[in-house]
């Protein structure tokens, strides 16, 4: 097993930030990425740095989109670290859970079974919870349905996080 460090001393790695940005993809104009989702712009941002919601048709430059993503991540990371007081994670675990928070939101993280399992020291159970049905659906549609063109990327991303999480346990 790899060495774990106190969550309070970790921050998102540069490699994880790049992976997150690539996973989100860039959209210069706000659109609804998946039926039933909120409008997003830039690298998956549903809100501007000032907290106002993104509206359909708004535009953003790549540089501003990177700044917005980093701003959101910084705020969410502080709340993420506070939610796991006393917990230790590897850098890889930390990175993938912050990526999850970026996709699903800090509110869902606070109520998630992953957080509960980590607090209880149940690292493998936390990994397995990444694949729960509520994290592979969009607007009630199961994104793990083979061959779907609606949201299959959501399922691929969940499986990738799970794989990396399990690898962090070795």
Image (cartoon, rainbow, N blue to C red):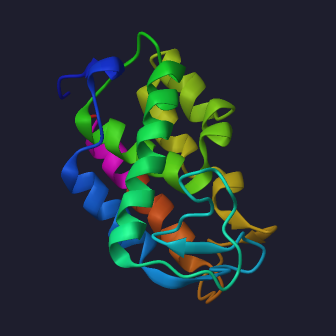
Picture coordinates of residue 169, whole percent (x, y) = 29, 34
Q: Residue pushed farthest front?
A: 50
Q: Is residue 14 above or below residue 32?
A: above
Q: Using residue 113 as the reference point, say whether residue 134 is left or right of it.
A: right
Q: Name the residue at 55% across, 28% down.
A: 115
Q: Can you tell which quarter of the image residue 59 is in? A: bottom right
Q: Is residue 131 above or below residue 63?
A: above
Q: Using residue 29 as the reference point, say whether residue 35 is left or right of it.
A: right
Please say whether residue 167 is one of the residues in the magenta stretch: yes
Q: How many marks?
A: 0
Q: Using residue 1 as the reference point, say whether residue 132 is left or right of it.
A: right
Q: Is residue 170 visible?
A: no
Residues drawn in magenta: 163-168
Quadrant of the image for the C terminus?
Answer: top left
Q: Name the residue at 67% across, 38% down.
A: 107
Picture coordinates of residue 19, whole percent (x, y) = 30, 63
Q: Nearer the viewer, residue 18 or 56?
A: 56
Q: Name the residue at 43% across, 49% down.
A: 71
Q: Is residue 34 above or below residue 125?
A: below
Picture coordinates of residue 157, whole percent (x, y) = 46, 65
Picture coordinates of residue 104, whole percent (x, y) = 60, 52
Quadrant of the image for the N terminus?
Answer: top left
Q: Nearer the viewer, residue 129 or 74?
A: 74
Q: Name the residue at 43% across, 46% down.
A: 73
Q: Is residue 151 above or below residue 97?
A: below
Please say whether residue 142 is one of the residues in the magenta stretch: no
Q: Residue pushed farthest top?
A: 86
Q: Main secondary structure of the magenta part?
A: helix
Q: Can you tell which quarter of the image residue 77 is in? A: top left
Q: Is residue 58 visible?
A: yes
């Amino acid at each position: 097993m790899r060495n774990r460090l106190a969550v309070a001393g970790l921050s998102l790695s540069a490699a994880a930030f790049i992976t997150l940005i690539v996973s989100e993809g860039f959209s210069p104009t706000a659109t609804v990425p998946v039926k039933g989702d909120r409008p997003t712009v830039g690298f998956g941002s549903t809100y501007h740095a000032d907290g106002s919601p993104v509206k359909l048709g708004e535009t953003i430059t790549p540089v501003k989109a990177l700044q917005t993503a980093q701003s959101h991540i910084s705020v969410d990371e502080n709340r993420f670290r506070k939610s796991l007081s006393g917990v230790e994670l590897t850098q890889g675990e930390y990175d993938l859970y912050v990526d999850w928070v970026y996709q699903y939101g800090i509110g869902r993280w606070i109520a998630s079974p992953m957080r509960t399992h980590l607090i209880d020291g149940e690292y493998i159970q936390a990994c397995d919870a990444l694949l729960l049905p509520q994290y592979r659906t969009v607007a009630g549609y199961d994104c793990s349905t083979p061959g779907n063109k609606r949201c299959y990327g959501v399922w691929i991303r969940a499986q990738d996080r799970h794989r990396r999480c399990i690898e962090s346990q070795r």
